[in-house]
Amino acid sequence: MEIRCTRPSCIKPQNFFSDLDDRAKLRTLQQRYCSNCGMPLFLADRYIPSKLLGQGGFGAAFLACDRYKPKMPLCVVKQFQPSGDLDAHEITVAQNLFQREAVVLEELGHQHPQIPDLYAFFTPIVSNAKGTAEEQYFYLAQEFIDGQDLDQELAAKGRFSEVEVTEILTEILKVLQFVHEHDTIHRDIKPSNIMRDKQGVLYLLDFGAVKQVAVGGGNQKKSTGIYSAGFAPPEQMTGSQVYPCTDIYALAVTCIILLTGKSVEELYDSHQISWNWQNYAPKISDSLKNTLDKMLLSTPAKRYQSAPEVLSALTVNSNQTNQAATPPTPPSPSPKSVVPTPKSSNPSPVKRQQPSFSLIEILGSAAFTGFEGALLYIGLTNLLSVSGISIGILGAVMGGVVFALNRRVIEKADLFIFAGITGTIVALLPILRGALLLPSVFIIAGISAAGAIAVTAFFRLVYQLLSRFL
């Protein structure tokens, strides 16, 4: 088993323990330590980090498993890791933000199915690498969302359609409505903080920059200077008071990046102090353009003031332009009616939209389809000769294979299992009939798989090029 050391200064953080591959034994073992720096590896004695998921200016995220749950499920362990150029005051502010994220996740995560649950918050004190002093570390463990964030989706598939962006806008606005009604402002909305899981459900992540507001909006305290450049509106960048419409501005920036496939630097005209994005998305409807432009206004008072106000504007503008071709956005979990239940309850109001596929998954499915098609053709023609019946059966079976791949009924290791079973069955046919040589079967199937990969890669490249220029 591989365990990752979480000490930031460790130069050899990967540790390998062959005896920990036994899951039953893993539950009963005492603490293990990093072979390089001596850092305890079992966090809070239960969370075992295996790899680094990401790292930023104030922290790092690790994929871990919980050894004290029966199925040892995966989770995310975030560690507070301030960069070295912060002064003492800035470190204190960042540390408070990290602890506030744990508080917000504890308050909101179990109440809304599109916000990750908090599992634990702990602050162990351990010896430094030299054993000469003690160091304190800050961790939180939260629900693991298995999927891709919108940054990753954009890189994989190119810019989003109006229908896709409208759906994302609507879903996240409903989550923000819940967040704002609980007197919280997220303050860091951006594509990398919106995750889509494999069932198509969107989650709002990373509440590390949240700000609590006084009930009734009377809080006049200045905002802490923590934000993502380009996504934060003027009031946030200057450290002034932030509002619910601060999140609305950042969500609009997220939407125009997804619509255009361009970076913030390409879309924002610093000379004119305005967003010039519409030329990169000429086919977008006037209703969506007008809604996003109002969300992007630099003066807070001139923007939409709340998430319900934007949702209402989307509905009104859509009706006015009679966009009957755009499918209606399905209802998502209503924060008003959500009760504190485990995420495994799988609330039905959330739309389970078709999950996106990575490039590796697409090419792997193409190779599997080509390989299976060749094997089935050889088998059927060996049994039935080349006839209308054999071709018909082949078409029906391959149609079912493509449908199963599209619905993820067959994926990952299943591809190898099914290919092996089919190869074994077909390989036995020449022995029974004396018609083919065994090596010929797999050579033909391999060539077919390679051809399917080449054709799929070519058409995907053509599609991406056309989608950027049309």
Image (cartoon, rainbow, N blue to C red):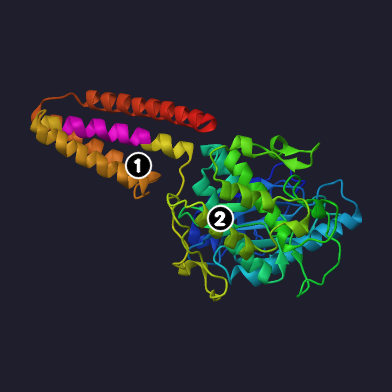
> Could you tell me which secondary element the residue under label 1 belongs to?
helix
Q: Is residue 190 visible?
A: no
Q: Position of residue 356 (x, y in %)?
A: 46, 46
Kindly check if marks 2 and 1 are in contact, taking CB atoms under 8 A apart as contact. Answer: no
Q: CA distance from mark 2 to mark 1?
A: 46 Å
**Residue tagged 1:** 415
Q: Which residues are magenta?
A: 366-379
Could you say which quadrant of the image residue 10 lies in? top right
Tell me the element at label 2.
helix
Tell me, yes or no, whether the highlighted magenta stretch contains residue 279. no
From the image, state whether disc 2 or disc 1 is nearer to you: 2
Kindly tell me whether residue 456 is visible in this rendering.
Answer: yes
Identify residue type, mark 1. Leu
Whether 372 is among the magenta residues is yes
Question: Which label's residue is closer to the chain start, 2 or 1?
Answer: 2
Q: Residue at x 18, y 30 (%)?
A: 378
> Which residue sits furthest right?
88
Residue that carries the numbered disc 2 in the rendered image = 317
Rendered residue at 62%/52% (across/down): 291
Residue depicted at x 38% and y 45%: 411
Q: Is residue 11 above or below residue 27?
A: above
